[in-house]
Structures are given as C-alpha cells and as structure tokens.
Image (spheres, rainbow, N blue to C red):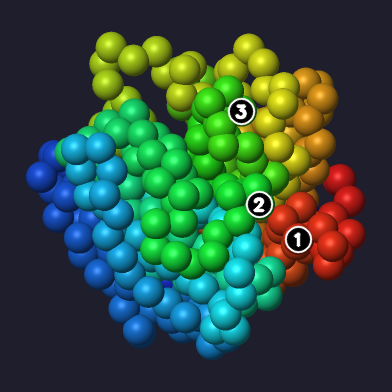
Amino acid sequence: MKAGAPLLARIILKDSLDWEALTAAQVITARKKINRTRSSRAARIVTGLPDGRADLEEHSIDLPGRRLNIRVHRPRIASSHLPLILSFHGGSFIVGTPAQNDWLNSHLAARCPAVVVSVEYRLAPEHSLLDSMADGYDTLLRLVDDPFGWGIDPAAVAVLGESAGGTLATLVALRARKEGPPLRAQVLTCPCTDWSETMTEHPSVARNAGNPGLSLSQLRAGRRLSLPLQLDPETVSPLKFASLADLPPTLVVSGALDPLEDHGRRYVERLRMDGVDACLTCYPRAIHAFLSVPGLVPAAHPARREILALMRHHLRPQTGSTPPAAS
C-alpha cells in the first residue's frame, strides 16, 4: 500500500475553497489573504527559515510598459561573476508569492553561491498566462545586463520553477533557446507541463486527487482564468511542443503523491527523446509543491540538496559536484 501524505500536511494544507465557484473578485480577495499568510513570519514554521548566509533584498525592475517587484537573495560574502538563478513561484497563475520559496532560494544563493531572483510576475484574473510569460522572459533579459551591479555572470544563468512557476521556467527556456540568452540549466519542481484539454487526464491526477498541496478545483480555475479564449493552450504547454531539442540540462523533482506527477515524468521522457540531458527524481511521501513546505514534508531536505548539486555542477563547473543520477 502506498504511504499517505504526512499528517501535518494533511491537516494544515487542506484546501477548503471551491476555486471554480469563485468570481474573479473573490479570487483576488482569496489570493491577498493567502499570500499575506505565506509571507508572514509565523508561516516560516511551515515554509522554512531563510538561510542566514544570504541577504534578502526587494527591488523594483523596469520592463517595457510596466514595473515588477523582484525578491533577491545574494550571498553575504561579496563576489564577482556570480551565477544568476531566475526563480518562479507556483500557484496555478492565480495565487502565490515569491516569499513562499525563501527557504530554497536563500540556500541556493548562499551555497551555490549565486544571485537568486524570484519574479513577482502578474497573475490572473487580472492578467493572462501570456503576461506572466512575458514578465519572466523580459526580467531575464534585463537582469543578465546586471543593472544593479550584483556581479552577475551572463554566461552562467539558470531557471528554476515550482508548479505553475515550472511552466514559466521552461517556457522562458524554450524562448531563450531561439532568442537568447543561453541557459546552463533548468530545474522544475512539481511542474505543470500540460495546460491543454488533457491537463487532468494524466493517470496521476486521478490517483492523487484529494492529496494536500493542490486541489483540482484550483488547477481548473487557474486554467480557466489565465488562458485567453483565443489562445491555443498547446502553445503554452511544454509537453505539447513539437520539439524540445536544445533545451539546457534539466532536473525535474516530483512527488509520488502529487496530482501532477505524470506531468513531470512525461516531460522528462519527451526531453530525453529529443536529446536533452534530463533526469527525474520522484520522492515517495512528497506532495505537490513540497519544497515550499519543508516544515511539513521531510523530503524537501534531500530534494534541496539535489537541486543545489545540479546548480553547482552546471553553473560553477570548476567547483561543481556530480549531478544527480537519472531515475
């Protein structure tokens, strides 16, 4: 018999909202409340304490026609030519905040070391997934020029994303393979790689529906609210792209109790078919987005070590460790 989700995760992360029944205004209200909670100091019991060896800063960045907020983790020991890791939080494109990933991002900043920037991209229902994607790519272009003088090495750049943020990370990588800048690695944790009509038809969705971390109601609401009616959803579904060739080396970290487990697994299969160096690790008692709740899911700790090892290997090869083996 397959082990269930950790008890505390089942109690604390139970989602009682019927997201599909909410109006657009109610979604925005719910998001504000959830994000305030996730950003609070009290929430660090669940989301984890930031690494004290990294400094946390908040900045605004000017992009064409808009200004975005970014959350920046930098190693306290000053250095030049630091790698850049661009990070995208999850939340089905309707909720989520960069603060929910401080535990992972600060650790990567301190230990890689690197400049880790989490993008506060625009969300639905006010904005579409296309706006979120533009925010990700435009921020990448802006930051490789090192506008804040952080000592970023433009030749050592990676993307990192969780859940819907995993969608963004790999869509940014897919655009960058044609238009630049070159990326050294992409890490996707519990990614959603299929926003088409088949999004909920993967076997893991039925198998893991009801587990904490992601409700199908939130997933469906995110799809309805973030995808414009005129948009072909396959154009924003990395799993549906005709070719994934020439993407950077990829690590996908998933949980066996995640409804989206098959999204990550099938994506790695496709990457390998197209000649990309890709590996998958699936943690047995891990739920969706478990790396943002290390206080509830112990598997977050070995997963973080694995992500750090891959980032070091590809971003700092002179001191890098051996990348994780494919599973």
Q: Where does label 3 land, which residue?
A: 177
- Which disc, if any, is residue 267? none
* Residue 242 relative to residue 100: left or right: right
Q: Amino acid at mark 3?
A: Arg
Across and down, in percent, residue 93 comes to 35, 42
Q: Is residue 77 visible?
A: yes
* Residue 124 relative to residue 181: left or right: left
- The residue nearer to you, when weighing 319 against 16, is 319
Residue at figure coordinates x 69%, y 45% from the top left: 184
CA gap, disc 3 and disc 1: 21 Å
Residue at figure coordinates x 61%, y 64% from the top left: 82
Contact flag, marks 2 and 1 (Cβ < 8 Å): yes
Q: Where does label 1 land, which residue?
A: 316
Residue at figure coordinates x 53%, y 26% from the top left: 179
Circle 3 SS class: helix
Q: Amino acid at mark 2?
A: Ala
Q: Amino acid at mark 1?
A: Arg
- Density class for disc 2 (Cα within 10 Å; few <14, some 14-19, many ≥20) is many
- Which disc, if any, is residue 156? 2
- The residue nearer to you, when weighing 159 against 289, is 159
Query: If you read the primary sequence from the N terminus, does the residue marked by circle 2 or circle 1 appear first?
Result: 2
Circle 2 SS class: strand
Residue at figure coordinates x 33%, y 70% from the top left: 58
